[in-house]
Amino acid sequence: MSRGRVETRLIPQNHGPSSVADATLRLRWSAPVTDMRGLPPMCVRADKQTVLCRTGALPADSRGRRIRVSARLAGAPSEVTVRIDTMWSGGAADHNPQNNTHKVLALDTGDVYYF
């Protein structure tokens, strides 16, 4: 994050035990988003703070394609929390639902955060 501009990049992963035909991820920022020109075609804006993105097919024990969402936050806050979670997975079995939600605090330093 830098001067109210935030870029979120993620690679969905399916640890198995079964394949997922498609899934939907939710990205929700703690501040309202004012500009979503960097929204990829597999994503839609759900409300002023939330974006939903399709992953496409995720075979068991595989990674999906990278999803990159660029946005501008209202008021250029000095910090923002982004929560990324699985909204829908087509009923696939999940033996570890605890890894379906991630929450990251990003400070306006221009640094890159990995998790």
Image (cartoon, helix red, strand yellow):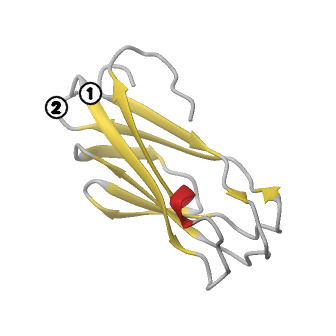
Q: Secondary structure at mark 1?
A: strand
| Residue 109: % across, % down | 37, 14
Q: Quadrant of the N terminus?
A: top left
The image position of residue 4, as x and y in percent, is: 29, 27
Q: Is residue 99 above or below residue 80?
A: below
Question: Quick one: 38 or 90, which is closer to the camera?
Answer: 90
Q: Do tag 2 and tag 1 residues touch (Cβ < 8 Å)?
A: no
**Residue 70 falls left or right of residue 94:** left
Residue that label 2 marks: 75
Place of residue 30 in the rendered image (x, y in percent of width and height, measured from the top left): 25, 45
- Residue type at numbered disc 1: Glu
Image quarter hosting the C terminus = top right
Q: Residue 115: which disc?
A: none
Of residues 64 and 35, the one drawn nearer to the viewer in this rendering: 64
Q: CA distance from mark 2 to mark 1?
A: 11 Å
* Nearest the eye: 19 or 108: 19
The nearer-to-camera label among 2 and 1 is 1
Please tell me in which quadrant of the rendered image residue 13 appears: bottom right
Looking at the image, the residue that sits furthest to the left is: 75
Query: Amino acid under label 2?
Result: Gly
Residue drawn where x is 50% and y is 39% of the image: 8
Q: How many marks?
A: 2
Quadrant location of residue 47?
A: bottom left
Residue on which disc 1 sits: 79
Label 2 crowding class (10 Å Cα cut-off): few <14, some 14-19, many 20+?
A: few
Q: Is residue 41 left or right of residue 101?
A: right
Residue drawn at point x = 26 percent, y = 27 percent: 79
Residue most toward the front? Answer: 95
Residue 9 drawn above or below residue 27:
above
